[in-house]
Image (cartoon, rainbow, N blue to C red):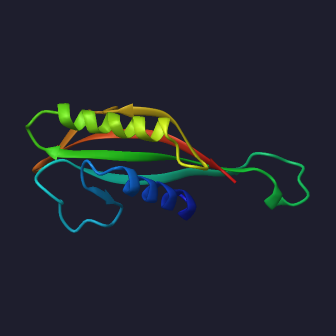
């Protein structure tokens, strides 16, 4: 689980800058928002560790939180992936080229994994995955 500080920063930023499709964040959806494209956002933190030594107190050292952001582009099943792939790529570009203060987005993939597109009922998903870190 990512820290509240990292999660809140990402949620606020995406809600401010992304208006192309509906955004749905973890545990917010009762049902699929539309029969068109939408983005399901998940964020996890995999590591929180001390990165420096020697400060007078532990809190004065550099601490790093690392994690993964998954942007699942949900699209109507059996209608192709061109639009969904484009949205995934736009989100990657948005986050890696216009970073959120205090969060650095690094390596990113679109559609990596087996299979690249997962179909579940009426929707298919193509996922953009971005590794991130935050220092405090």
Q: Position of residue 66 (x, y in %)?
A: 58, 47
Q: Quadrant of the C terminus?
A: bottom right
Q: Position of residue 65 (x, y in %)?
A: 62, 51
- In the rendered image, is residue 68 in sight? yes
Which one is nearer the viewer's eye here, 112 or 104?
A: 104
Q: Is residue 2 left or right of residue 24?
A: right
Q: Is residue 8 left or right of residue 79?
A: right
Q: What residue is shown at x 80% (from left), y 46% (from top)?
A: 52
Which one is nearer the viewer's eye here, 82 or 54?
A: 82
Image height of 59 relative to 68, above or below: below
Residue 28 appears in which quarter of the rendering? bottom left
Q: Is residue 71 left or right of residue 124?
A: right
Image height of 30 relative to 103, above or below: below
Q: What residue is shown at x 43% (from left), y 58% (from top)?
A: 11
Q: Position of residue 73 (x, y in %)?
A: 26, 44
Q: What residue is shown at x 53% (from left), y 43% (from top)?
A: 132
- In the rendered image, is residue 1 in sight? no
Q: Position of residue 60 (x, y in %)?
A: 82, 57
Q: How many marks?
A: 0
Q: What residue is shown at x 10% (from left), y 50% (from top)?
A: 122
């Amino acid at each position: 689980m990512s820290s509240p500080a990292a999660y809140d920063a990402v949620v606020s930023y995406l809600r401010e800058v992304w208006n192309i499709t509906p955004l749905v964040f973890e545990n917010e959806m009762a049902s699929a928002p539309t029969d068109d494209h939408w983005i399901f956002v998940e964020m996890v933190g995999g590591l929180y560790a001390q990165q420096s030594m020697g400060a007078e107190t532990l809190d004065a050292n550099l601490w790093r939180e690392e994690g993964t952001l998954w942007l699942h582009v949900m699209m109507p099943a059996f209608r192709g992936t061109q639009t969904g792939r484009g949205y995934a790529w736009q989100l990657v570009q948005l986050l890696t080229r216009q970073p959120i203060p205090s969060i650095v987005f690094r390596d990113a993939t679109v559609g990596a994994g087996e299979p690249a597109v997962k179909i579940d009922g009426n929707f298919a998903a193509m996922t953009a995955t971005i590794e991130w870190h935050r220092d405090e």
